[in-house]
Amino acid sequence: MFLLKSIPKIDKFVSNKNFDDLGQELILNISKNVIQELRENILNKKTLSFNEKDLIDEVINQYEELIKPSLQQVINATGVIVHTNLGRSLISKETFENVTEILSSYNNLEYDLNKGQRSQRYYHVSKIICKLLSCEDVLIVNNNASAVFLILNTFSKKKEVIVSRSELVEIGGSFRIPDVMKESGAKLVEVGTTNKTHLQDYKKAINKKTSMLMKVHKSNYSIEGFTSEVKFKELSTLAKDNDILDYYDMGSGHLIDLPYGLKNDEPSVLEYMKKNPSLLSFSGDKLLGSVQAGIIVGKKKYINKLKQNQLLRMLRVDKITLAILEENLRSILFGKIDDIPTLKMLFLKEETLISNAKVLQNKIKDICTCEIINTKTPIGGGTTPNRLIPSIALNIQIKNYKASKIEILLRKKNIIGRINSDKFLLDFRTININDIKFIAQSIKDIINE
Ligand SMILES: *Cc1c(COP(=O)(O)O)cnc(C)c1O
């Protein structure tokens, strides 16, 4: 009973001078919880004694934990360029600088400066994309998942959509083609088998209720061996002959040919546009290297129908997205790919990777074992399934620590590496040269801790 009576009164407790410079509202809430917990612990005999100093420290600890920014900068040393867990594509500081003035002022987001009247927000990027891709029109939505949903809902509600069984993919998190289709109101008609689908399979499935032939990029898996799939070009032709839509969900669309012999496996959006499709859609923050967005390109008459769907109001993008997207597309138009970090990293030459790795090696070679090795890494983001590109890594050994221990210790310093057959690696494909000093210091700290 005595202990209960000695619990501090909340008003007096929060007036302690240790709290003076802190947010009073937050301190009051945390203090109430801490004191309530103390009371419960005394009642059920978990706490047999306490002192006020410990309570104050506890409140301050909880306060500091709460006000710490949750979204933090990390160093991606995994080598995976389009890493969805680590924020996918980076936006360069230059890009931000170039759009800052526009975004912190009023602007012509939906205003035609020539005519002095309302216009469409999509116009700013559509003129560049139409120039780059020679397509009729463009629509930008929140992400590619929204693009798929909007397209299916607009053209295929209560109608049938034919998709190859091998393309009914699940893409990280909660995006499953069959489920998205169901939610959109479209009826899925699967054709072919897991490993083989022929044009004949699509042909046989077409009937009065068919609205669309859809192709889906496999993104995170590939089928090897006895396989066959129908090219989008053939699907397009078949769709046109039957007066229905052809649509390709490309996943990660890119406008610049990929290096390392990936060009033929993964043609660019330009190549697909040559086939004159009804509609294509792709992500803004995968290999395009820009912000989160879903980019829909294709025929004007179909884009117009998408614009009339009420759903678009829910999926529409903000001026921040459009400004950055426009800036990045201008860089692509002018061939300035170094302004787009995703593309810059993708095209980094092996010599550059080696010389960057040497910079770190020279800083730490006296305090730990570190060897430069040739390695391979996926590009990530469901871009080129099961294909690896060459890279250079430093294999770091600290004391007699296991690779998994080094991984944890560096992760605590926001440096995310990877483990390859029991070796801890820092992959230079994704390490920014400006971060090398911080990495070296972190390794020194770990050794001295
Ligand atoms: C990544 C991906 C999506 C989802 O795109 P988000 O931009 O992440 O919404 C849809 N379809 C395919 C085939 C994908 O690879």
Image (cartoon, helix red, strand yellow):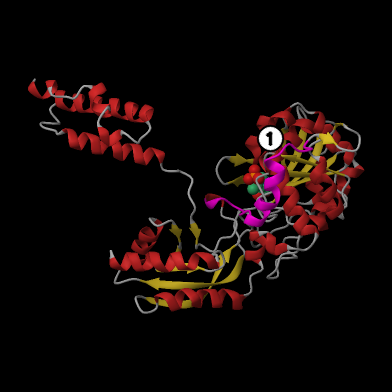
Q: Is residue 269 above or below residue 395?
A: above
- Of the pair 10 and 317, the residue shown nearer to us: 10
Q: Can residue 192 be seen in this snapshot?
A: no
User: Which residue carries the number 1 mark?
Assistant: 181
Q: Residue at x 33, y 30 (%)?
A: 27
Q: Is residue 92 magenta?
A: yes
User: Left of 256 or right of it: where is 97?
Assistant: left
Residue 379 position, x and y percent, is 61, 61
Q: Secondary structure at mark 1?
A: helix
Stretch of the chain drawn in magenta: 86-109
Q: Quadrant of the C terminus?
A: bottom left
Check disc 1 and give the amino acid type: Met
Question: Which of the 4 quarters of the picture holds residue 265?
Answer: bottom right
Q: Residue at x 52, y 50 (%)?
A: 85
Residue 296 position, x and y percent, is 77, 43
What is the count of numbered marks? 1
Question: Which of the 4 quarters of the picture holds residue 414?
Answer: bottom left
Question: Label 1: how many residues lie within 10 Å, few (<14), some (14-19) or many (20+)?
Answer: some
Q: Is residue 2 magenta?
A: no
- Of the pair 43 and 244, the residue shown nearer to us: 43
Residue 84 position, x and y percent, is 56, 51
User: Left of 31 or right of it: where is 257?
Assistant: right
Q: Is residue 184 above or below residue 293?
A: above
- Of the pair 343 and 229, the residue shown nearer to us: 343
Q: Residue at x 68, y 56 (%)?
A: 287
Q: Can residue 21 be seen in this snapshot?
A: yes
